[in-house]
Image: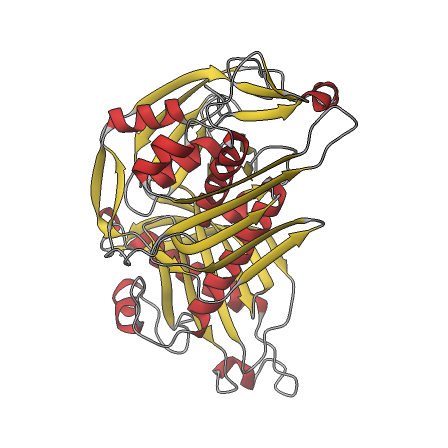
Amino acid sequence: MLPNTPTPPPRAQRTLKTPVEYRGVGLHSGKEIRVVLRPAEAGNGVTFVRTDLDEQPEVRAHGNNMRARERRTCIQDGRAEVYTCEHLLATLYALGIDNAMVEIDGEEVPGMDGAATEFVRGVKDAGVVELKAQRTVYAVKHPIYVREGNASLVALPGSGRLTVEYHLDYPARNGAVSHTAQTVGFEVTAELFEREIAPARTFVFEHEVEALRAAGLGKGAGPQNTLVMGPHGPRDTQLQWDDELARHKVLDLIGDLANVGVDLDAHIIATRSGHALNRHLVRQLLDAIEHEQEQSDGPLENGLDIREILKLLPHRYPFLMIDRVIELEGFKRAAGIKNVTINEPFFQGHWPEQPIMPGVLQLEAMAQLAGVLLLRKLENTGKLAVLWSIDKVKLRGAVVPGDQLRVEVETIRTKPMVGHVRARCKVAGKLVAEAELKFTLVDA
Protein backbone atom coordinates (compact mmCIF):
# COMPACT_ATOMS: atom_id res chain seq x y z
CA MET A 1 0.00 0.00 0.00
CA LEU A 2 1.13 3.53 -0.72
CA PRO A 3 1.17 5.80 2.35
CA ASN A 4 -1.69 8.26 2.82
CA THR A 5 -0.84 11.96 2.55
CA PRO A 6 -2.92 14.93 3.64
CA THR A 7 -4.86 16.80 0.98
CA PRO A 8 -2.72 19.78 -0.08
CA PRO A 9 -4.29 23.25 -0.03
CA PRO A 10 -5.36 24.74 -3.40
CA ARG A 11 -2.38 26.11 -5.24
CA ALA A 12 -1.87 28.90 -7.73
CA GLN A 13 -1.45 28.12 -11.41
CA ARG A 14 2.15 28.34 -12.59
CA THR A 15 4.13 29.07 -15.70
CA LEU A 16 7.80 29.38 -16.62
CA LYS A 17 9.84 32.36 -15.52
CA THR A 18 11.98 32.40 -18.68
CA PRO A 19 11.92 30.49 -22.00
CA VAL A 20 13.80 27.22 -22.37
CA GLU A 21 15.00 25.62 -25.61
CA TYR A 22 15.57 21.99 -26.56
CA ARG A 23 17.06 20.50 -29.72
CA GLY A 24 17.16 16.86 -30.65
CA VAL A 25 16.09 14.07 -32.96
CA GLY A 26 12.57 12.62 -33.04
CA LEU A 27 12.53 8.99 -31.91
CA HIS A 28 10.19 7.98 -34.73
CA SER A 29 10.63 10.61 -37.46
CA GLY A 30 14.43 10.82 -37.17
CA LYS A 31 14.15 14.57 -37.86
CA GLU A 32 16.13 17.28 -36.08
CA ILE A 33 13.59 19.31 -34.08
CA ARG A 34 13.79 22.58 -32.13
CA VAL A 35 11.38 23.19 -29.24
CA VAL A 36 11.05 26.42 -27.24
CA LEU A 37 8.90 26.56 -24.10
CA ARG A 38 7.65 30.06 -23.33
CA PRO A 39 5.67 31.51 -20.40
CA ALA A 40 1.88 31.72 -20.84
CA GLU A 41 -1.01 33.35 -19.02
CA ALA A 42 -3.32 31.57 -16.57
CA GLY A 43 -5.85 29.28 -18.23
CA ASN A 44 -3.77 28.86 -21.38
CA GLY A 45 -2.81 25.29 -20.57
CA VAL A 46 0.03 23.66 -22.51
CA THR A 47 -0.39 24.70 -26.14
CA PHE A 48 1.88 23.63 -28.99
CA VAL A 49 2.52 26.03 -31.88
CA ARG A 50 3.67 24.52 -35.19
CA THR A 51 6.10 27.25 -36.27
CA ASP A 52 7.02 25.33 -39.42
CA LEU A 53 3.50 25.55 -40.89
CA ASP A 54 1.71 28.47 -42.53
CA GLU A 55 -0.22 30.61 -40.01
CA GLN A 56 1.48 28.64 -37.21
CA PRO A 57 -1.56 26.57 -36.14
CA GLU A 58 -1.93 25.59 -32.49
CA VAL A 59 -3.01 22.45 -30.69
CA ARG A 60 -3.68 22.29 -26.98
CA ALA A 61 -2.62 19.31 -24.91
CA HIS A 62 -6.09 18.09 -23.96
CA GLY A 63 -7.96 14.81 -24.03
CA ASN A 64 -10.32 16.10 -26.71
CA ASN A 65 -7.33 16.45 -29.03
CA MET A 66 -5.72 13.05 -28.39
CA ARG A 67 -5.49 10.78 -31.42
CA ALA A 68 -4.65 7.10 -31.89
CA ARG A 69 -1.06 6.56 -33.03
CA GLU A 70 1.10 3.46 -32.65
CA ARG A 71 3.49 3.48 -29.68
CA ARG A 72 3.27 7.21 -28.97
CA THR A 73 1.01 9.97 -27.74
CA CYS A 74 -0.43 12.27 -30.38
CA ILE A 75 -2.50 15.44 -30.14
CA GLN A 76 -4.07 17.01 -33.20
CA ASP A 77 -6.29 19.96 -34.01
CA GLY A 78 -6.80 20.50 -37.72
CA ARG A 79 -3.41 20.83 -39.43
CA ALA A 80 -1.58 21.10 -36.11
CA GLU A 81 -0.35 17.65 -35.07
CA VAL A 82 2.31 16.88 -32.48
CA TYR A 83 3.34 13.43 -31.33
CA THR A 84 5.75 11.74 -28.91
CA CYS A 85 4.91 14.56 -26.50
CA GLU A 86 4.32 12.34 -23.46
CA HIS A 87 7.72 12.78 -21.78
CA LEU A 88 7.54 16.57 -22.02
CA LEU A 89 3.93 16.64 -20.79
CA ALA A 90 4.81 14.35 -17.87
CA THR A 91 7.60 16.73 -16.89
CA LEU A 92 5.35 19.78 -16.98
CA TYR A 93 2.65 18.01 -14.96
CA ALA A 94 5.01 16.66 -12.30
CA LEU A 95 6.86 19.96 -11.91
CA GLY A 96 3.60 21.90 -11.71
CA ILE A 97 3.89 23.92 -14.94
CA ASP A 98 0.25 24.41 -15.92
CA ASN A 99 0.61 27.01 -18.67
CA ALA A 100 3.16 27.16 -21.48
CA MET A 101 3.37 27.99 -25.18
CA VAL A 102 5.47 25.28 -26.83
CA GLU A 103 6.90 26.39 -30.17
CA ILE A 104 7.96 23.40 -32.26
CA ASP A 105 9.31 23.35 -35.83
CA GLY A 106 8.18 19.81 -36.67
CA GLU A 107 5.58 17.20 -35.87
CA GLU A 108 7.50 15.28 -33.17
CA VAL A 109 8.91 16.33 -29.82
CA PRO A 110 12.58 15.29 -29.79
CA GLY A 111 13.44 12.11 -27.93
CA MET A 112 16.42 13.64 -26.11
CA ASP A 113 17.75 10.92 -23.77
CA GLY A 114 14.73 8.66 -24.35
CA ALA A 115 13.42 9.72 -20.96
CA ALA A 116 12.62 13.06 -19.28
CA THR A 117 15.84 13.99 -17.49
CA GLU A 118 16.80 16.74 -19.94
CA PHE A 119 13.27 18.16 -19.94
CA VAL A 120 13.36 18.34 -16.13
CA ARG A 121 16.74 20.07 -16.16
CA GLY A 122 15.58 22.72 -18.63
CA VAL A 123 12.35 23.49 -16.77
CA LYS A 124 14.19 23.81 -13.46
CA ASP A 125 16.74 26.15 -15.02
CA ALA A 126 13.94 28.30 -16.48
CA GLY A 127 12.28 28.75 -13.09
CA VAL A 128 8.64 28.97 -12.08
CA VAL A 129 6.22 31.90 -11.66
CA GLU A 130 2.89 31.72 -9.81
CA LEU A 131 -0.15 33.28 -11.49
CA LYS A 132 -3.27 34.92 -10.07
CA ALA A 133 -5.60 31.99 -10.68
CA GLN A 134 -6.12 28.68 -8.91
CA ARG A 135 -5.26 25.34 -10.43
CA THR A 136 -8.29 23.07 -10.78
CA VAL A 137 -8.12 19.78 -8.86
CA TYR A 138 -10.34 16.82 -9.66
CA ALA A 139 -10.76 14.19 -6.94
CA VAL A 140 -11.93 10.81 -8.22
CA LYS A 141 -14.93 9.78 -6.11
CA HIS A 142 -15.90 6.45 -7.64
CA PRO A 143 -13.84 3.78 -9.45
CA ILE A 144 -13.33 4.42 -13.17
CA TYR A 145 -12.30 1.32 -15.10
CA VAL A 146 -11.15 0.65 -18.66
CA ARG A 147 -9.93 -2.61 -20.16
CA GLU A 148 -8.67 -4.07 -23.44
CA GLY A 149 -7.82 -7.76 -23.49
CA ASN A 150 -5.47 -8.49 -20.61
CA ALA A 151 -4.60 -4.80 -20.09
CA SER A 152 -6.52 -2.66 -17.62
CA LEU A 153 -6.54 0.70 -15.91
CA VAL A 154 -8.53 1.73 -12.87
CA ALA A 155 -8.72 5.14 -11.21
CA LEU A 156 -9.68 4.99 -7.54
CA PRO A 157 -10.29 7.71 -4.95
CA GLY A 158 -6.93 9.09 -3.86
CA SER A 159 -5.44 10.44 -0.68
CA GLY A 160 -4.88 14.03 -1.75
CA ARG A 161 -2.44 13.55 -4.63
CA LEU A 162 -1.86 11.47 -7.74
CA THR A 163 -0.39 8.06 -6.95
CA VAL A 164 0.37 5.41 -9.56
CA GLU A 165 0.96 1.66 -9.49
CA TYR A 166 2.16 -0.11 -12.61
CA HIS A 167 2.17 -3.88 -13.09
CA LEU A 168 4.27 -4.88 -16.10
CA ASP A 169 4.08 -8.46 -17.34
CA TYR A 170 5.57 -9.63 -20.64
CA PRO A 171 5.37 -13.39 -21.27
CA ALA A 172 8.32 -15.37 -22.60
CA ARG A 173 8.49 -15.44 -26.41
CA ASN A 174 10.22 -18.36 -28.14
CA GLY A 175 13.60 -17.57 -26.65
CA ALA A 176 13.49 -13.95 -27.90
CA VAL A 177 12.20 -12.60 -24.59
CA SER A 178 12.36 -14.11 -21.15
CA HIS A 179 9.34 -13.65 -18.89
CA THR A 180 9.50 -10.08 -17.56
CA ALA A 181 7.38 -8.99 -14.60
CA GLN A 182 7.89 -5.72 -12.70
CA THR A 183 5.75 -3.75 -10.27
CA VAL A 184 6.33 -0.18 -9.09
CA GLY A 185 4.34 2.40 -7.14
CA PHE A 186 4.91 6.13 -6.70
CA GLU A 187 3.37 9.26 -5.29
CA VAL A 188 3.84 11.82 -8.05
CA THR A 189 5.76 14.72 -6.55
CA ALA A 190 8.30 16.92 -8.31
CA GLU A 191 11.20 15.57 -6.26
CA LEU A 192 10.30 11.92 -6.65
CA PHE A 193 9.54 12.34 -10.35
CA GLU A 194 12.97 13.86 -11.00
CA ARG A 195 14.81 11.20 -9.05
CA GLU A 196 12.86 7.98 -9.62
CA ILE A 197 10.79 8.32 -12.81
CA ALA A 198 12.23 10.89 -15.22
CA PRO A 199 15.51 8.97 -15.93
CA ALA A 200 13.66 5.77 -16.99
CA ARG A 201 14.33 5.25 -20.71
CA THR A 202 12.20 4.25 -23.68
CA PHE A 203 12.53 0.56 -24.51
CA VAL A 204 11.78 -1.86 -27.31
CA PHE A 205 12.16 -5.62 -27.54
CA GLU A 206 14.75 -6.92 -29.97
CA HIS A 207 12.23 -8.99 -31.92
CA GLU A 208 10.07 -5.86 -32.53
CA VAL A 209 12.76 -3.70 -34.13
CA GLU A 210 12.44 -4.94 -37.71
CA ALA A 211 8.64 -4.60 -37.76
CA LEU A 212 8.81 -1.08 -36.32
CA ARG A 213 11.32 0.03 -38.91
CA ALA A 214 9.16 -1.48 -41.65
CA ALA A 215 6.26 0.60 -40.33
CA GLY A 216 8.36 3.76 -40.61
CA LEU A 217 8.89 4.08 -36.85
CA GLY A 218 12.02 4.32 -34.72
CA LYS A 219 14.08 6.21 -37.32
CA GLY A 220 15.75 8.28 -34.60
CA ALA A 221 16.13 5.50 -32.03
CA GLY A 222 19.60 4.37 -31.00
CA PRO A 223 21.68 3.33 -27.99
CA GLN A 224 21.75 6.94 -26.78
CA ASN A 225 17.97 7.07 -26.26
CA THR A 226 16.44 3.57 -26.42
CA LEU A 227 16.88 0.33 -24.50
CA VAL A 228 16.81 -2.67 -26.83
CA MET A 229 15.76 -5.65 -24.71
CA GLY A 230 16.96 -9.12 -25.67
CA PRO A 231 16.45 -12.50 -23.97
CA HIS A 232 19.16 -11.72 -21.40
CA GLY A 233 18.51 -8.02 -20.80
CA PRO A 234 19.34 -4.79 -22.61
CA ARG A 235 21.75 -4.70 -25.53
CA ASP A 236 24.72 -2.27 -25.45
CA THR A 237 23.92 -0.80 -22.00
CA GLN A 238 22.86 -1.54 -18.44
CA LEU A 239 19.57 -0.96 -16.64
CA GLN A 240 19.54 1.88 -14.11
CA TRP A 241 17.06 -0.10 -12.00
CA ASP A 242 15.89 -3.69 -12.25
CA ASP A 243 12.37 -2.29 -12.79
CA GLU A 244 13.32 0.48 -15.24
CA LEU A 245 10.80 -0.74 -17.83
CA ALA A 246 7.88 -0.36 -15.41
CA ARG A 247 9.17 3.06 -14.34
CA HIS A 248 9.16 4.18 -17.96
CA LYS A 249 5.57 3.00 -18.31
CA VAL A 250 4.72 5.24 -15.34
CA LEU A 251 6.46 8.15 -17.10
CA ASP A 252 4.31 7.56 -20.20
CA LEU A 253 1.15 7.24 -18.13
CA ILE A 254 1.74 10.53 -16.30
CA GLY A 255 2.31 12.24 -19.66
CA ASP A 256 -0.99 10.91 -20.99
CA LEU A 257 -2.90 11.81 -17.80
CA ALA A 258 -1.59 15.38 -18.14
CA ASN A 259 -4.09 15.74 -21.00
CA VAL A 260 -6.96 15.77 -18.49
CA GLY A 261 -5.85 19.35 -17.86
CA VAL A 262 -6.25 19.36 -14.06
CA ASP A 263 -4.37 18.17 -11.00
CA LEU A 264 -5.63 14.69 -10.19
CA ASP A 265 -6.39 13.40 -6.72
CA ALA A 266 -6.54 9.72 -7.59
CA HIS A 267 -4.86 6.36 -7.19
CA ILE A 268 -4.21 4.77 -10.60
CA ILE A 269 -3.59 1.04 -10.93
CA ALA A 270 -2.27 0.06 -14.36
CA THR A 271 -1.77 -3.50 -15.59
CA ARG A 272 -0.02 -3.99 -18.95
CA SER A 273 -1.50 -0.73 -20.23
CA GLY A 274 -0.08 1.45 -23.00
CA HIS A 275 -0.92 4.68 -24.79
CA ALA A 276 -4.18 3.44 -26.33
CA LEU A 277 -5.68 2.42 -23.00
CA ASN A 278 -4.28 5.52 -21.30
CA ARG A 279 -6.15 7.61 -23.85
CA HIS A 280 -9.41 5.83 -23.02
CA LEU A 281 -8.92 6.52 -19.30
CA VAL A 282 -8.31 10.20 -20.03
CA ARG A 283 -11.62 10.28 -21.92
CA GLN A 284 -13.42 8.59 -19.03
CA LEU A 285 -11.96 11.07 -16.53
CA LEU A 286 -13.06 14.01 -18.68
CA ASP A 287 -16.56 12.53 -18.93
CA ALA A 288 -16.67 12.13 -15.13
CA ILE A 289 -15.59 15.74 -14.62
CA GLU A 290 -18.24 16.95 -17.09
CA HIS A 291 -20.97 14.87 -15.44
CA GLU A 292 -20.06 16.16 -11.99
CA GLN A 293 -20.22 19.76 -13.21
CA GLU A 294 -23.62 19.20 -14.80
CA GLN A 295 -24.99 17.72 -11.59
CA SER A 296 -23.62 20.39 -9.29
CA ASP A 297 -26.07 22.99 -7.97
CA GLY A 298 -23.65 24.41 -5.44
CA PRO A 299 -21.65 27.64 -5.58
CA LEU A 300 -19.40 28.08 -8.60
CA GLU A 301 -15.71 28.00 -7.82
CA ASN A 302 -14.58 28.74 -11.35
CA GLY A 303 -17.57 30.09 -13.25
CA LEU A 304 -20.05 32.95 -13.52
CA ASP A 305 -23.59 33.30 -12.21
CA ILE A 306 -26.32 35.09 -14.13
CA ARG A 307 -25.52 38.49 -12.59
CA GLU A 308 -21.92 38.27 -13.80
CA ILE A 309 -23.06 37.13 -17.25
CA LEU A 310 -25.36 40.16 -17.54
CA LYS A 311 -22.40 42.43 -16.85
CA LEU A 312 -20.56 41.02 -19.88
CA LEU A 313 -23.33 40.44 -22.45
CA PRO A 314 -25.82 42.97 -23.86
CA HIS A 315 -28.47 40.25 -24.32
CA ARG A 316 -31.62 40.20 -22.18
CA TYR A 317 -34.82 38.17 -21.95
CA PRO A 318 -36.11 36.59 -24.11
CA PHE A 319 -32.85 36.33 -26.04
CA LEU A 320 -30.33 35.50 -23.32
CA MET A 321 -29.35 31.87 -23.99
CA ILE A 322 -26.88 31.20 -21.16
CA ASP A 323 -28.14 30.63 -17.59
CA ARG A 324 -24.74 30.17 -15.99
CA VAL A 325 -21.10 29.54 -16.82
CA ILE A 326 -19.86 26.51 -14.94
CA GLU A 327 -16.24 26.41 -16.06
CA LEU A 328 -13.65 28.92 -17.22
CA GLU A 329 -10.04 28.24 -18.18
CA GLY A 330 -8.54 31.68 -18.63
CA PHE A 331 -9.37 32.93 -22.12
CA LYS A 332 -9.01 29.52 -23.77
CA ARG A 333 -12.12 27.56 -22.82
CA ALA A 334 -15.55 27.90 -21.21
CA ALA A 335 -18.55 25.69 -20.49
CA GLY A 336 -22.05 26.96 -19.80
CA ILE A 337 -25.59 25.74 -19.15
CA LYS A 338 -28.92 26.58 -20.78
CA ASN A 339 -31.98 24.99 -19.14
CA VAL A 340 -34.60 24.40 -21.83
CA THR A 341 -38.22 24.57 -20.55
CA ILE A 342 -41.64 24.50 -22.18
CA ASN A 343 -41.99 28.16 -21.12
CA GLU A 344 -39.42 29.31 -23.68
CA PRO A 345 -41.16 31.97 -25.82
CA PHE A 346 -39.92 30.45 -29.09
CA PHE A 347 -41.90 27.26 -28.45
CA GLN A 348 -45.14 29.21 -28.93
CA GLY A 349 -44.44 29.54 -32.65
CA HIS A 350 -41.82 26.89 -33.45
CA TRP A 351 -43.62 23.56 -33.81
CA PRO A 352 -45.78 24.11 -30.68
CA GLU A 353 -47.32 20.63 -31.01
CA GLN A 354 -43.87 19.03 -31.19
CA PRO A 355 -41.52 21.50 -29.47
CA ILE A 356 -37.89 21.38 -30.61
CA MET A 357 -35.34 24.09 -29.87
CA PRO A 358 -34.33 25.72 -33.18
CA GLY A 359 -30.80 24.94 -34.29
CA VAL A 360 -30.12 28.61 -34.90
CA LEU A 361 -30.75 29.26 -31.20
CA GLN A 362 -28.26 26.58 -30.27
CA LEU A 363 -25.80 28.51 -32.44
CA GLU A 364 -26.83 31.69 -30.63
CA ALA A 365 -26.10 30.03 -27.27
CA MET A 366 -22.64 29.06 -28.56
CA ALA A 367 -22.06 32.62 -29.78
CA GLN A 368 -23.11 34.14 -26.45
CA LEU A 369 -20.80 31.87 -24.44
CA ALA A 370 -17.98 32.72 -26.86
CA GLY A 371 -18.76 36.38 -26.22
CA VAL A 372 -18.38 35.81 -22.48
CA LEU A 373 -14.99 34.19 -23.06
CA LEU A 374 -13.73 36.99 -25.33
CA LEU A 375 -15.13 39.92 -23.38
CA ARG A 376 -13.52 38.86 -20.09
CA LYS A 377 -10.20 40.15 -21.37
CA LEU A 378 -9.33 43.52 -19.90
CA GLU A 379 -8.35 44.83 -23.33
CA ASN A 380 -11.90 44.08 -24.58
CA THR A 381 -13.68 46.03 -21.84
CA GLY A 382 -16.47 48.15 -23.33
CA LYS A 383 -16.57 46.21 -26.61
CA LEU A 384 -19.15 43.98 -28.27
CA ALA A 385 -18.40 40.59 -29.85
CA VAL A 386 -20.20 40.70 -33.21
CA LEU A 387 -20.60 37.40 -35.03
CA TRP A 388 -18.68 37.54 -38.30
CA SER A 389 -18.91 34.05 -39.78
CA ILE A 390 -20.17 30.55 -38.99
CA ASP A 391 -18.48 27.48 -40.44
CA LYS A 392 -18.56 23.67 -40.17
CA VAL A 393 -22.07 23.66 -38.69
CA LYS A 394 -23.53 20.25 -37.84
CA LEU A 395 -26.88 19.76 -36.07
CA ARG A 396 -26.84 16.22 -34.75
CA GLY A 397 -29.83 15.85 -32.44
CA ALA A 398 -33.08 17.38 -31.18
CA VAL A 399 -33.19 19.53 -28.04
CA VAL A 400 -36.59 19.44 -26.32
CA PRO A 401 -38.22 20.88 -23.18
CA GLY A 402 -36.69 19.41 -20.04
CA ASP A 403 -33.21 19.12 -21.55
CA GLN A 404 -30.20 20.84 -20.05
CA LEU A 405 -28.03 22.14 -22.87
CA ARG A 406 -24.33 22.12 -22.08
CA VAL A 407 -22.48 24.62 -24.26
CA GLU A 408 -18.69 24.44 -24.68
CA VAL A 409 -16.40 26.86 -26.50
CA GLU A 410 -12.66 26.66 -27.04
CA THR A 411 -10.47 29.36 -28.51
CA ILE A 412 -8.76 28.46 -31.77
CA ARG A 413 -7.06 31.81 -32.29
CA THR A 414 -7.34 35.37 -31.00
CA LYS A 415 -5.90 38.53 -32.49
CA PRO A 416 -6.56 42.18 -31.71
CA MET A 417 -10.22 42.80 -32.61
CA VAL A 418 -10.80 39.22 -33.87
CA GLY A 419 -11.74 35.96 -32.17
CA HIS A 420 -12.09 32.42 -33.60
CA VAL A 421 -13.62 29.62 -31.51
CA ARG A 422 -14.78 26.03 -31.81
CA ALA A 423 -18.14 25.39 -30.11
CA ARG A 424 -20.30 22.39 -29.16
CA CYS A 425 -23.69 21.76 -27.58
CA LYS A 426 -24.41 18.55 -25.67
CA VAL A 427 -27.39 17.02 -23.90
CA ALA A 428 -26.69 14.30 -21.32
CA GLY A 429 -23.20 13.92 -22.77
CA LYS A 430 -24.45 13.46 -26.36
CA LEU A 431 -23.28 15.91 -29.00
CA VAL A 432 -26.26 17.72 -30.55
CA ALA A 433 -24.60 20.62 -32.39
CA GLU A 434 -21.18 21.96 -33.29
CA ALA A 435 -19.69 24.85 -35.28
CA GLU A 436 -16.74 27.18 -35.67
CA LEU A 437 -17.48 30.85 -35.06
CA LYS A 438 -15.52 34.00 -35.86
CA PHE A 439 -16.14 37.37 -34.22
CA THR A 440 -15.02 40.92 -34.68
CA LEU A 441 -14.79 43.11 -31.59
CA VAL A 442 -16.26 46.58 -31.95
CA ASP A 443 -16.78 49.51 -29.59
CA ALA A 444 -20.09 49.33 -27.77
Q: Residue at position x 50%, y 63% from top?
A: 288
Colouring style: secondary structure
* Left or right: 227 as drawn, with respect to 414: right
In this rendered view, identify the residue nearer to me: 322 or 431.
431
Q: Residue at position x 28%, y 25% from top?
A: 19
In this rendered view, identify the residue nearer to me: 47 or 384.
47
Quadrant for the N terminus in the image: bottom left
Residue 82, horizontal then vertical, whole percent: 53, 31
* Left or right: 421 as drawn, with respect to 133: right
Residue 172, horizontal then vertical, whole percent: 73, 32
28 in relation to 148, above or below? above
Quadrant for the C terminus in the image: bottom left
49 in relation to 349, above or below? above
Q: Looking at the rendering, which quadrant does residue 315 occupy?
A: bottom left
Residue 101 in view in this figure:
no
Q: Residue at position x 41%, y 49% from top?
A: 163
Tell me how many marks there are: 0
Residue 400, horizontal then vertical, whole percent: 59, 78
Q: Residue at position x 49%, y 39% from top?
A: 250
In this rendered view, identify the residue nearer to me: 361 or 233.
233
Residue 372, horizontal then vertical, whole percent: 34, 59
In this rendered view, identify the residue nearer to me: 62 or 403.
62
Residue 376 in view in this figure:
yes
